[in-house]
Image (cartoon, rainbow, N blue to C red):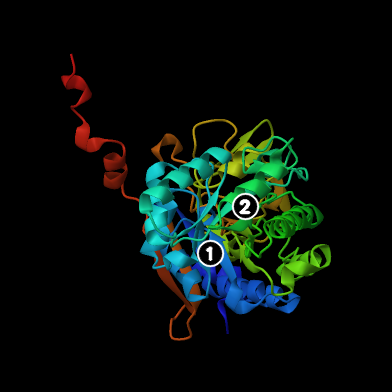
């Protein structure tokens, strides 16, 4: 039996019995390891079925979706690389032993030091702007030799946005990439490649949640057409790799995995058939869609109360773990499952209830007016589909400690049938104080 076959109630009961929610840390993230492995297998199979060659395709996980070294190590073991957008994410990928040649550095604000490190390591770099490309020119002159890194340019195909403005990266005014439809931009890009034989990649990322697959495919097609134009203009196959980004949306409304990697790969094959004919290497940068369905945030109900006739369950899962849901609930609604103090699924007639978090502001709510079996102090709530972004990107409001994160898999030899492995230990108060400058407590008072 794989962990994907274990009922959530069994996992929750095992987590409680095995002490993953102690009195001092009443919230935790749980990751289904077999679910993650199944998602990576699905991704690879979908692109290979569409015609992508295994030896020239790199699926680079977007580290921002789960900035946790053991998760990156697990994914590397499944054949994935890493897409990083900061020195911290690069350090995490290296700590997870992701090979430099399987790392891609994307960011609109790379420093000279970041670029120099990437070039020294052989990490692939996608320049985000004309100024960054000029900075690369200078660094390569300093190096006085051919670059070890694969180098490219990120373009903004300007094909439009989805339903969530903040996650739409191919609008007319997006901050990312060289705006392809701006006056003179296309000619400049062709010239930039012609003048730099070491440029061999084009990169585009249309967006993620809220972006329809057709919009994403349109952005990829525009990038492919630009690559063809550049190669015709320079008279050789200089652009050899297309980085098509990631961004596959996730269905947060049910257990169904839709859309699928297979559906997207088939759409890409229809939109840009030349993408899979063997002339171009491919890089993808999926994140949320690989992990979301395999994660749960589990939290204890501390109190219940009534206000204005509505029941409120005050839990330990709020904005610090579900920041997007709290601040943009219409775009990021989450399903909630409820369990009793021992982790058994709660039953009973549904009662409209607010599920509140521990943060000290009125809007710290992960669900409003949700019909659920009546919750009581000591019960537990589970926020579903939260394997990406939620417990891995902590928001330290009210100095709430980061929760522990644990992977799990089925284990017949365990009395609970579930084995857990620590991904990140719960942050202690001592660690929190140190992070808050505890070692420098008297420094400001010494200034006169």
Residue 240, picture quadrant: bottom right
- Which residue corresponds to the image point at 79% horizontal and 64% vertical from the top-left? 272
Q: Position of residue 275 (x, y in %)?
A: 73, 67
Q: Position of residue 131 (x, y in %)?
A: 53, 38
Is residue 113 visible in the rendered structure shown here? Answer: yes
Is residue 384 visible in the rendered structure shown here? Answer: no
Nearest to viewer (mark 1 / mark 2): 2
Q: Nearer the viewer, residue 134 or 392?
A: 134
Q: Is residue 83 left or right of residue 448?
A: right
Q: Position of residue 195 (x, y in %)?
A: 58, 50
Q: Nearer the viewer, residue 318 or 370?
A: 318
- Which residue corresponds to the image point at 66% horizontal and 42% vertical from the top-left? 188
Mark 2 Cα-neighbour bin, 10 Å: few <14, some 14–19, many ≥20 = some
The residue indicated by pointer 1 is 343
Where the N terminus falls, by quadrant?
bottom right
Where the C terminus falls, by quadrant?
top left
Depicted 285 relative to depicted 132: above or below = below
Mark 1: which secondary structure? loop
Mark 1 Cα-neighbour bin, 10 Å: few <14, some 14–19, many ≥20 = many
Q: Position of residue 193 (x, y in %)?
A: 61, 52
- Which residue corresponds to the image point at 18% horizontal and 27% vertical from the top-left? 442
Mark 2: which secondary structure? helix
Q: Is residue 316 left or right of residue 171?
A: left
Depicted 129 relative to depicted 418: above or below = above
Q: Is residue 316 left or right of residue 293?
A: left
- Which residue corresponds to the image point at 54% horizontal and 55% vertical from the top-left? 65
The residue indicated by pointer 2 is 194
| Mark earlier in primary sequence (1, 2) | 2
Residue 387: mark: none
């Amino acid at each position: 039996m794989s962990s994907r076959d274990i009922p959530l109630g069994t996992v929750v009961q095992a987590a409680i019995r095995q002490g993953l929610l102690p009195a001092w840390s009443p919230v935790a993230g749980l990751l289904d390891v077999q679910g993650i492995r199944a998602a990576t297998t699905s991704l690879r199979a979908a692109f290979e079925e569409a015609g992508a060659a295994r030896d020239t395709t790199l699926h680079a996980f977007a580290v921002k979706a789960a900035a946790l070294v053991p998760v990156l190590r697990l994914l590397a073991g499944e054949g994935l690389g890493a897409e990083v957008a900061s020195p911290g994410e690069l350090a995490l990928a290296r700590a997870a032993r992701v090979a430099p040649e399987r790392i891609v550095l994307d960011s609109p604000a790379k420093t000279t030091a970041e670029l120099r490190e990437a070039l020294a390591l052989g990490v692939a770099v996608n320049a985000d702007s004309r100024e960054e490309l000029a900075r690369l020119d200078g660094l390569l002159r300093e190096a006085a030799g051919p670059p070890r890194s694969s180098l490219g340019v990120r373009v903004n195909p300007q094909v439009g946005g989805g339903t969530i403005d903040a996650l739409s990266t191919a609008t007319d005014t997006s901050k990312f990439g060289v705006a392809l439809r701006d006056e003179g931009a296309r000619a400049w890009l062709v010239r930039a490649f012609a003048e730099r034989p070491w440029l061999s990649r084009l990169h585009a990322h249309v967006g993620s949640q809220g972006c329809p697959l057709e919009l994403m495919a349109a952005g990829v097609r525009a990038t492919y057409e630009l690559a063809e134009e550049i190669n015709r203009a320079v008279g050789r196959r200089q652009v050899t790799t297309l980085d098509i980004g990631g961004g596959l949306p996730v269905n947060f409304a049910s257990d169904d995995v839709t859309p699928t990697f297979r559906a997207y790969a088939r759409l890409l094959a229809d939109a840009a058939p030349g993408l899979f004919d063997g002339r171009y290497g491919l890089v993808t940068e999926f994140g949320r869609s690989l992990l979301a369905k395999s994660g749960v945030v589990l939290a204890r109900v501390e109190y219940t109360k009534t206000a204005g006739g509505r029941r409120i369950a005050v839990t330990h899962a709020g904005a610090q773990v579900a920041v997007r849901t709290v601040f943009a609930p219409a775009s990021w609604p989450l399903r909630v499952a409820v369990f009793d103090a021992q982790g058994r699924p709660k039953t009973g007639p549904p009662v409209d209830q607010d599920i509140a978090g521990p943060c000290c502001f009125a809007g710290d709510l992960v669900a409003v007016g949700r019909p659920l079996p009546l919750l009581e102090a000591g019960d537990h709530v589970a926020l579903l589909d939260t394997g990406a972004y939620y417990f891995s990107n902590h928001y330290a409001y009210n100095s709430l400690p980061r929760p522990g994160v644990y992977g799990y898999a089925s284990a017949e030899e365990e009395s609970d049938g579930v084995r857990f492995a620590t991904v990140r230990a719960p942050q202690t108060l001592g660690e929190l104080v140190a992070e808050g400058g505890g070692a420098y407590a008297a420094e400001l008072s010494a200034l006169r």
